[in-house]
Image (cartoon, rainbow, N blue to C red):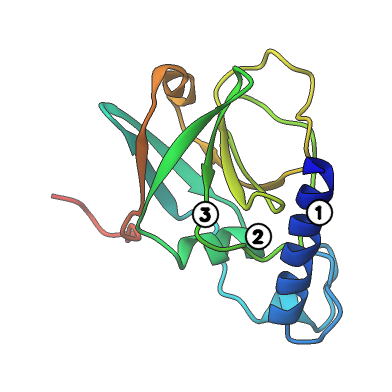
Amino acid sequence: MPKKMMLAGLLALMLFTLSACSGEAPVSSSAAGPGLTESYESVEGRRVKMTAGDVEVMITLNDSRAAADFASMLPLELGMVERNGFAKGMTLPRALATEEATTREYQIGDFGYWAAGPDLAIFYDGIYEQTIVPVIPMGRAEAGAENMRHTAGMVRLELMPEQTGGATG
């Protein structure tokens, strides 16, 4: 019975995601032609500060539609859950765009999105060869992802101001 309920929930999430789409067929992120990839503003290089208690990790976002969609939701405060001793997960209030390819490969510091959650993940340990579920890569922690191991409770995610090329000070 729980499997049927989970399957029904996943089906409902898929239908909701499909109904929210514009009706155009998804376009691979590697495609250069017209389509969905032209209708978002890249956040590549933008930084997100992740704060959990006294642990702070800076994440640099990539050029994915999911990362741009995520950045548009910030700031957020989310509950964290442990993911099998190698990642912290956070459930988003809504699903993100999912046009990019997924992977099960990861490295310490990778930041990704699991659409079925809809969950974020920050990977802090390399104990497994790959993830159990496919994730969309959205960015990478500059340093300190290992420090997420002992965090619990709430996490704050906020988009940092864009840095300009001028002198600081």
- Amino acid type at circle 3 is Leu
Q: Residue 155 in the image: state x and y as whole percent.
A: 37, 40
Q: Residue furthest front?
A: 1
Q: Nearer the viewer, residue 58 or 96?
A: 96
For disc 3, the marked residue is 92
In the depicted structure, whether residue 111 falls above or below residue 148: below
Say which of marks 3 and 2 sits in front: 3
Q: Residue 82 in the image: state x and y as whole percent.
A: 54, 26
For disc 2, the marked residue is 64
Is residue 77 found left or right of 13 in the rendered image?
left
- Amino acid type at circle 1 is Ala
Mark seen at residue 75: none
- Amino acid type at circle 2 is Ser
Spatial CA distance of label 3 from label 1 is 20 Å
For disc 1, the marked residue is 101
Q: Residue furthest left?
A: 169
Q: Residue 17 in the image: state x and y as whole percent.
A: 72, 71
Spatial CA distance of label 1 from label 2 is 10 Å
Q: Secondary structure at mark 3?
A: loop
Say which of marks 3 and 1 sits in front: 3
Characterize the local packing of mark 1: few (<14), some (14-19) or many (20 or more) Cα atoms within 10 angstroms.
few
Q: Nearer the viewer, residue 37 or 166?
A: 37
